[in-house]
Image (spheres, helix red, strand yellow):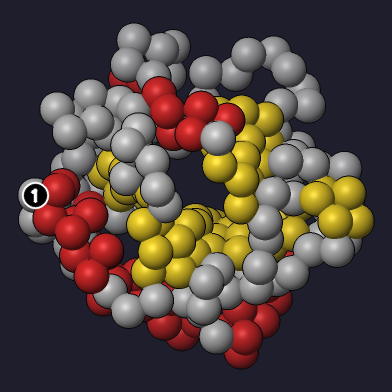
Amino acid sequence: MSMPRDSIAERLAAQPGVQRVPTAKAALFQHKRFVASDLAAELIALIDTDRRPSTIADDNGDAYFRTSETCDLPAYLPAVQRIEALITALSGIDPAYGEPLQGQRYAEGQEFKPHTDYFTPGGRDYDRYCALSGNRTWTFMVYLNDVAAGGATRFKLLDKMFQPEAGKLLCWNNRLPDGGVNHATLHHGMKVRKGVKYVITKWYREQPWQG
């Protein structure tokens, strides 16, 4: 990474508008007004244009484990460049370590059951996804719109829940201080009860991205 992992957390905590979520179990932050409404609207339009069914690593056979849709967002698009620049300026993480930006769309009844963003060491798909760039480190996720009902992100092991709010960023370190994976980052994209939820997600890796 471009700086020691502890320094990333320190940098985030020092940024205007960023709140560190009170828990000793994970480095977890939120910024309630991170993305302006015009940029959010542009990203929503991109997601709607080119979305596809979401997939998962280490498929457990549950066809309803992740029922959202996903959109790969090309780096050359102006809206993508704007949000990438915002995340880089906030985090200080070298963009070379970042995966391409993704968008997700959750219609009524859709969810992503409790999961982690890191790939489980020893898991069936670990080598496939981690051989070149290593495991995931930080996650940056932004809610792009308000949701009429449901759609919260629940960290059960941290006893924390976050409601979708347009422009709100959540970010967390998927690792422990010793570099191991942090099981406490297990989270649930809860079922949307009314309306549609849009988010964008940026993941970083241990080594420069070679996807």
Residue 80 in sight from this viewpoint? no
16 over 194 or under it: above or below: below
Q: Is residue 103 left or right of residue 140?
A: right
Looking at the image, the residue that sits furthest to the bottom is 38
83 over 123 or under it: above or below: below
Q: Quadrant of residue 184?
A: top left
Q: Quadrant of residue 76?
A: bottom left
195 over 78 or under it: above or below: above
Q: Position of residue 114 (x, y in %)?
A: 61, 28
Q: Residue at x 35, y 33 (%)?
A: 25
Q: Residue at x 57, y 74 (%)?
A: 167
Q: Position of residue 170 (x, y in %)?
A: 47, 57
Q: Name the quadrant of the C terminus.
A: top left
Q: Position of residue 150 (x, y in %)?
A: 80, 50
Q: Residue at x 78, y 26 (%)?
A: 64
Category of crowding for the residue at label 1, using alpha-carbon neighbours closer than 10 angstroms: few (below 14), some (14–19), many (at least 20): few
Q: Secondary structure at mark 1?
A: loop
Q: Residue at x 55, y 85 (%)?
A: 36
Q: Amino acid at mark 1?
A: Pro
Q: How many labels, in total?
A: 1
Quickly name the residue at label 1.
Answer: 4
Seen from the viewer's position, the closer of residues 112 and 177 is 177
Residue 194 in sight from this viewpoint? yes
Seen from the viewer's position, the closer of residues 32 and 46 is 32
Seen from the viewer's position, the closer of residues 24 and 84 is 24
Q: Quadrant of residue 171?
A: bottom left
Q: Position of residue 174 (x, y in %)?
A: 34, 37
Q: Is residue 109 left or right of residue 180?
A: right
